[in-house]
Amino acid sequence: MLVTVKLYATLGDYLPAGSRNNRVDVEAPEGAIVSAVLAPFALPPKLTHLVLVNGTFVAPEERATRMLKDGDTLAVWPPIAGG
């Protein structure tokens, strides 16, 4: 199945060379879970602050069990400070 991974802000540095618009399409086995799809990117856990699947928040404790479907979009943001 094909899943789109979007890594925002400084996490874009973890995308493969040649990736455009902070996104990459990845091939994953049917029923792959969020944490397995993100594993090849070697994201530091403390930087995976906000994880969304198709715009819906996935809590840290659900990332090891939340299964993805073909065509899903997995988006990740680091903690961001501002004011």
Image (cartoon, grey):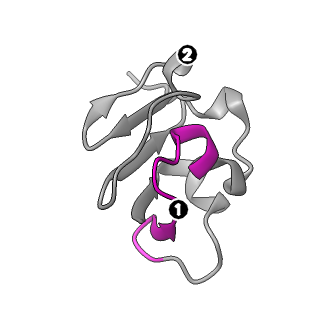
Is 55 on the left or on the right of 15, as rendered?
left
Measured Cα–Cα span from mark 2 to mark 1: 21 Å
Closest to the observer, 27 or 50: 27
Amino acid on which disc 1 is placed: Ala
- Residue 76, labelled with which disc? none
Residue 53 among magenta residues:
no
- Residue interval drawn in magenta: 20-37
Residue occupying the far left of the picture: 55
Q: Is residue 22 magenta?
A: yes
Amino acid type, label 2: Glu
Locate residue 18: give its quadrant.
Answer: bottom right
The residue that label 1 is drawn on is 28
Tag in front: 2 or 1: 1
Q: Give the camera-side residue of 46 and 56.
A: 56
Graded by Cα atoms within 10 Å as few (under 14), some (14 to 19) or many (20 or more), the crowding at tag 1 reads: some
* Dot 2 alpha-carbon crowd within 10 angstroms: few under 14, some 14 to 19, many 20 or more: few
Q: Position of residue 27 (x, y in %)?
A: 51, 69
The label on residue 61 is 2
**Between residues 29 and 71, which one lies in front from this camera angle?**
29
Residue positioned 41% across, 61% down in the render = 3
Residue 75 higher or lower than 50, as above or below: below
Left/right placement of residue 71 relative to residue 40 reads left
Residue located at (52% from left, 27% from top): 65
Which residue is at the front of the view, 49 or 59?
Answer: 59
